[in-house]
Image (tube, rainbow, N blue to C red):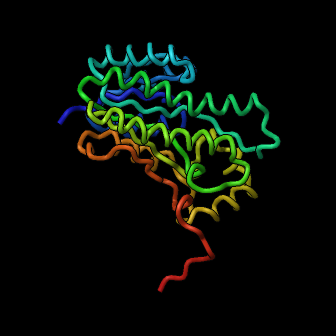
Amino acid sequence: MSTIKAAVIGAYGGIGQALCLELSQTSSTMFLIGRDSEKLQNLAQGYGSGSCVADAADWDQIDRALGQAQEVMQGLNAVVCLAGSVLLKPMHLTSRAEWDATMQANLSAAAGALRSAVTRMSDGGSIVLMSSAAAHIGLSNHEAIAAAKAGIEGLVRSAAMTYASKRIRVNAVAPGLVQTPLTQRVWNNPRSAEVSLGMHPVGRFGEPGDIARAIHFLIDPKNNWITGQALAVDGGLGSLKPTGPARPS
């Protein structure tokens, strides 16, 4: 079975760090990519991994970074794009600049990562992009981010078909609310946390490790019959409707 040689874009975020930890416990090789040079260097040194500073929304920078990853690891068979942002505003209060920035940080970043990755996987591989439960269920004040993430899922399905003959699998993970620095303003506010928690039927928020394990599953070559999917790892948020406290029989 081939070893995972993974480029992780957005490696020092909450989910990125959990994924690095997850992969470090296996025989996988990692190459870490992110915008903050100091954070990236500290993380890469901790794992003895190669790294490259790049803005995920800049297609040329990401192409160079993935080229470097391929060279350093002597191959590339997994690319995970964790770059993204969160904008919680109703549409009538969303400026054009905020809309464009949300699309750039999420949909355009995912497209750029995919565009470069497929040219560097001559022996096949796995690409994982980040969607959201907001793409599956109507959540108030999520118009921009829901549109961006829904676009990513459309990108995943089409690309999965386009590159299937090259043995390149393309999938997404669609989390609910995960406790990371990016979402801290929601889960760290007692009022919003109570409302959001009530929407997750399993009764807790997600942890970075929940998402990291799902990503690891999707990039593992043993699971090479899965493509074109958006794997919901969301505590039931996107598909279940809580009606009150559960009553065990």
Q: Is residue 2 left or right of residue 96?
A: left
Image location of residue 204, percent across then percent down: 56, 60
Q: Is residue 139 left or right of residue 228?
A: right
Q: Is residue 188 left or right of residue 23?
A: right
Q: Is residue 54 left or right of residue 158?
A: right
Q: Residue at x 70, y 40 (%)?
A: 87
Name the one closer to the observer, 124 or 157. Answer: 157
Within the image, what quadrant is residue 164 found in?
top left
Name the one closer to the observer, 12 or 63. Answer: 63
Image location of residue 233, percent across then percent down: 47, 53
**Placement of 74 over or under 219, stated as above or below:** above
Q: Residue at x 54, y 82 (%)?
A: 247
Name the one closer to the observer, 40 or 170. Answer: 170
Within the image, what quadrant is residue 100 found in?
top right
Image location of residue 144, percent across then percent down: 68, 41
Name the one closer to the observer, 71 or 145. Answer: 145
Residue farthest to the left, as pictured: 1
Locate the N terminus and report the quarter of the image it occupies. Answer: top left
Residue farthest to the right, as pictured: 93
Image location of residue 82, percent across then percent down: 50, 34
Q: How many marks?
A: 0
**Placement of 120 over or under 199, stated as above or below:** above
Q: Residue at x 48, y 19 (%)?
A: 62
Within the image, what quadrant is residue 246 found in?
bottom right
